[in-house]
């Protein structure tokens, strides 16, 4: 393995560890691991994905599905990215491959938002919540209003 590849791999591992440290610290300080949920009180489209992956790692597919029904997609996405990177190095001009990749990305984004809207509307999701009043931004605004208003 050449130095360039080792550097890229170490940078990717460092980025993943930094994100994990951020989430762990946020969870330790606030009881919420997700910065979006902490700030807004509203779950994001990927809410439950980490818990789903943990359940999957423990062999509990049913719980993984309950936390996020699209739990297999990050693994498929990683495989697609690796295949794409390998093929780009082999084939310098692959416009069809790029189009398929873009359609794949768009489809995944659309799926996440469709599932997100369904989970928000149905209200019976284990992971998704809508509670803006518990978000840090709302509490800060209320605090400021109370201090100004007297």
Image (tube, rainbow, N blue to C red):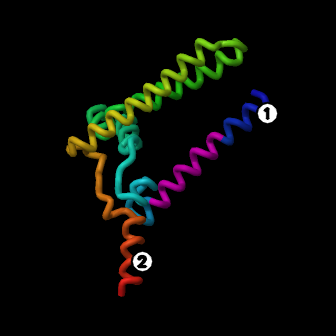
**Helix or strand or loop: what does disc 2 sit on?**
helix
Instruction: Pick the quarter of the image with the C terminus.
Output: bottom left
Is 128 covered by the magenta stretch? Answer: no
Furthest-front residue in this view: 149
The image shows residue 41 at horizontal and vertical percentages of 35, 58
Q: Is residue 71 above or below residue 31?
A: above
Q: Earlier in the sequence, mark 1 or mark 2?
A: 1
On screen, 14 above or below 31? above
Q: Residue at x 37, y 45 (%)?
A: 47
Identify the residue under disc 1.
Answer: 3
| Residue pictured at 36% horizontal, 39% vertical | 52
Q: Main secondary structure of the magenta part?
A: helix
Mark in front: 1 vs 2: 2
Magenta-drawn stretch contains 20: yes
Asked whether, in this view, residue 79 is left or right of residue 108, the answer is right
Element assignment for label 1: helix
Q: Taking 18 as reference, is 136 left or right?
A: left
What is the total number of numbered labels drawn onto the structure image? 2
- Residue at 29 percent across and 58 percent down: it is 131
The alpha-carbon separation of the residues under discs 1 and 2 comes to 52 Å
Answer with the quarter of the image where residue 144 lies: bottom left
Q: Position of residue 20 (x, y in %)?
A: 52, 50
x then y, percent, for residue 127: 30, 46
Q: Residue furthest bottom?
A: 150
Pointer 2 residue: 144
Chain part drawn in magenta:
12-26
Q: Residue at x 31, y 64 (%)?
A: 133
Question: Dividing the image into 4 quarters, which one contains the N terminus?
Answer: top right
Viewer-side residue, 51 vs 44: 44
Q: Residues within 10 Å of mark 1 (few under 14, many from 20)?
A: few
């Amino acid at each position: 393995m050449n130095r360039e590849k080792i550097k890229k791999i170490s940078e990717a591992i460092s980025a993943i560890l930094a994100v994990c440290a951020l989430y762990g610290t946020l969870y330790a300080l606030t009881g919420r691991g997700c910065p979006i949920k902490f700030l807004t009180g509203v779950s994001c489209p990927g809410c439950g994905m980490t818990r789903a992956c943990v359940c999957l790692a423990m062999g509990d597919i049913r719980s993984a599905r309950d936390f996020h029904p699209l739990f297999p997609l990050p693994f498929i996405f990683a495989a697609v990215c690796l295949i794409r990177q390998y093929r780009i190095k082999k084939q310098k001009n692959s416009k069809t491959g790029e189009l398929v990749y873009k359609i794949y990305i768009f489809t995944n984004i659309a799926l996440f938002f469709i599932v997100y809207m369904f989970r928000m509307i149905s209200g019976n999701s284990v992971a998704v919540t809508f509670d803006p009043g518990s978000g840090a931004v709302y509490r800060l605004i209320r605090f400021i209003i109370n201090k100004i208003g007297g």
